[in-house]
Image (cartoon, rainbow, N blue to C red):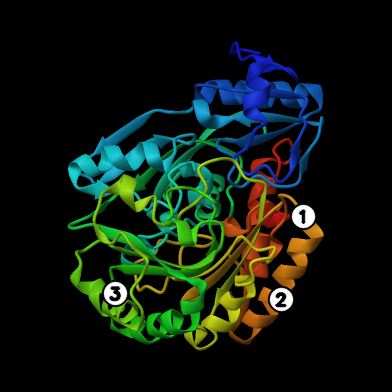
């Protein structure tokens, strides 16, 4: 190998770290783990893997981990790709693929800017963006995939390439199209993307006892038409942990959880907030001015690795009429579902050309179960089936693939024609199949 990249064997500290993803629902037993710090080192790992007859699979934080990784694979731990440049005047960022949004946005907001991050600050910018990238800033600004300007990547031969809209080689133009929401092709090492101006960030979450579900959901649904275009909301039933950061009466029980964010001040959110507060006073209400770090807390994601599996489906415009019926699937205390949410993502933001650079519907239902205690995969999947049936009347036939936790294959995340085009691009970039394909192609 031209670069001195260490391949770490089983039981080494680097191997243990590289096979401990944020989502621990699957098993990872690769032949080796590599942790390159430069694009050249990534190239060298790909060349060495091909020489050994092994595949390579990139993984930064492992939020999208799922299924089994066997000893025919080298995991490339891309969390070592950490360079970051913020261009305040151009409103762009240039970031290593292993950086997380929790590392990028606090530095961008010093300049009054933010990237189009997701709900969790520990998600890496690469995997999130290549999966579409839908979060709290989608309504005013669109998907993170549409903000993507270029990607430095390594192909299946180990060549370092640059995917841009105006690249000379059509393969690189196609690669950028696939990186924009199609799960990506090759191994990304560096991303350039737009940042957006944030004038007056407000966010927070509200909690009620589960008995308030019907009244709160009705108030949420009927007030959505009145909120501003900068306002994002998620209404959920959440099973809280028995943790002291919740009031005693809301510890270890199902609760109603409303998360609200506005990138342009409080006024646009007041119709919603006034409506839900009027029906019954929330037990917890954290709404107020905030920053990037505060925005990243309102979804109440668990702070540690969880063996979670998820279901996420795009829903149509009349979702509010059946929202309570869908959310009620998680209301029983003994439910196998840790959470069901319905997120409003409808927007009219400008989009760039790509595999998935716009929302597929105005709403998403997202259900999660944790493989803990009595909750087996079979048990959770039965609960998912009830959610699918309840949501079918407003379903649009597509998954939101990046929210389908613990899945190693989400082929219905993309329309069939789009999926076939992404697969063709992946085969062109990597004709020998050295690089593991995106789960969107499984």
Q: Badge 3: few (under 14), some or many (20 or more) residues near its Cα, within 10 Å? A: many
Against 404, is 313 above or below?
Answer: below
Q: Badge 2: few (under 14), some or many (20 or more) residues near its Cα, within 10 Å? A: some
- The foreground one among 355 and 121 is 121
Query: Where does residue 120 sit, x and y in percent of width and height?
Result: 46, 49
Which residue shows up at 30% across the image and 59% down it? Answer: 286
Dot 3: element: helix
Q: For residue 276, which quarter of the picture?
A: bottom left
- The foreground one among 432 and 251 is 251
Q: Earlier in the sequence, mark 2 or mark 3?
A: 3
Q: CA distance from mark 3 to mark 1?
A: 37 Å
Q: Is residue 276 left or right of residue 336?
A: left
Q: Which mark is residue 386?
A: 2
Identify the image quadrant of the C terminus.
Answer: bottom right
Identify the image quadrant of the N terminus.
Answer: top right
Q: CA distance from mark 2 to mark 1?
A: 18 Å
Which residue shows up at 22% across the image and 45% down it? Answer: 90
Q: Badge 1: few (under 14), some or many (20 or more) residues near its Cα, within 10 Å? A: few
Q: Is residue 427 left or right of residue 286?
A: right
Q: Earlier in the sequence, mark 2 or mark 1?
A: 1
Q: For residue 72, which quarter of the picture?
A: top right
Which residue is label 3 attached to? 273
Query: Where does residue 324 sit, x and y in percent of width and height?
Result: 53, 82
Which residue shows up at 40% across the image and 43% down it? Answer: 101
| Residue 328 can be seen in this image | yes
Query: Where does residue 156 sit, x and y in percent of width and height?
Result: 67, 35
The reply to whether callout 3 and callout 1 are in contact (CB within 8 Å) is: no
Dot 1: element: loop
Against 284, is 119 above or below?
Answer: above
């Amino acid at each position: 190998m031209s670069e001195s990249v260490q391949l770490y064997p089983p039981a080494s500290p680097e191997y243990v770290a590289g096979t401990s993803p944020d989502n621990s629902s699957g098993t990872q037993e690769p032949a080796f783990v590599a942790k390159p710090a430069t694009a050249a080192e990534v190239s060298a790992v790909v060349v060495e893997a091909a020489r050994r007859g092994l595949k390579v699979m990139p993984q930064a934080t492992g939020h999208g981990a799922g299924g089994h990784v066997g000893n025919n694979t080298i995991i490339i731990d891309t969390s070592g790709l950490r360079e970051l440049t913020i261009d305040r005047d151009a409103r762009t960022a240039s970031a290593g693929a292993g950086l997380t949004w929790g590392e990028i946005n606090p530095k961008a907001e010093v300049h009054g800017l933010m990237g189009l991050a997701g709900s969790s600050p520990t998600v890496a910018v690469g995997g999130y963006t290549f999966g579409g990238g839908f979060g709290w800033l989608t309504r005013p600004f669109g998907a993170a995939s549409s903000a993507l300007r270029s990607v430095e990547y390594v192909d299946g031969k180990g060549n370092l390439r640059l995917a841009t809209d105006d690249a000379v080689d059509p393969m690189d133009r196609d690669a950028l199209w696939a990186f924009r929401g199609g799960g990506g092709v090759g191994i990304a090492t560096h991303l350039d993307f737009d940042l957006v101006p944030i004038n007056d960030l407000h966010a927070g979450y509200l909690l009620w006892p589960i008995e308030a579900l019907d009244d709160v959901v009705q108030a949420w649904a009927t007030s959505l038409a009145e909120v501003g275009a900068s306002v994002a909301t998620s209404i959920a039933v959440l099973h809280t942990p028995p943790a002291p950061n919740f009031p005693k009466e809301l510890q270890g029980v199902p609760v109603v959880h409303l998360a609200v964010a506005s990138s342009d001040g409080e006024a646009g959110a007041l119709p919603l907030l006034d409506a839900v507060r009027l029906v019954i006073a929330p037990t917890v209400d954290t709404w107020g001015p905030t920053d990037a770090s505060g925005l990243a807390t309102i979804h109440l994601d668990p702070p540690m690795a969880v063996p979670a599996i998820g279901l996420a489906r795009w829903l149509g415009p009349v979702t509010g009429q059946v929202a309570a019926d869908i959310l009620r699937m998680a209301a029983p205390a003994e439910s196998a579902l840790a959470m069901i949410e319905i997120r409003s993502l409808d927007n009219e933001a400008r989009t760039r050309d790509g595999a998935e650079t716009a929302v597929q519907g105005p709403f998403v239902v997202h259900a999660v179960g944790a493989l803990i205690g009595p909750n087996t995969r079979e048990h959770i999947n039965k609960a998912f089936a009830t959610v699918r049936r309840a949501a079918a009347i407003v379903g649009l036939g597509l998954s939101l693939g990046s929210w389908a936790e613990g899945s190693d294959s989400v082929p219905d995340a993309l329309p069939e024609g789009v999926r076939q085009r992404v697969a063709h691009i992946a085969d062109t970039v990597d004709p020998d199949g050295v690089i593991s394909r995106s789960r969107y192609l499984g």
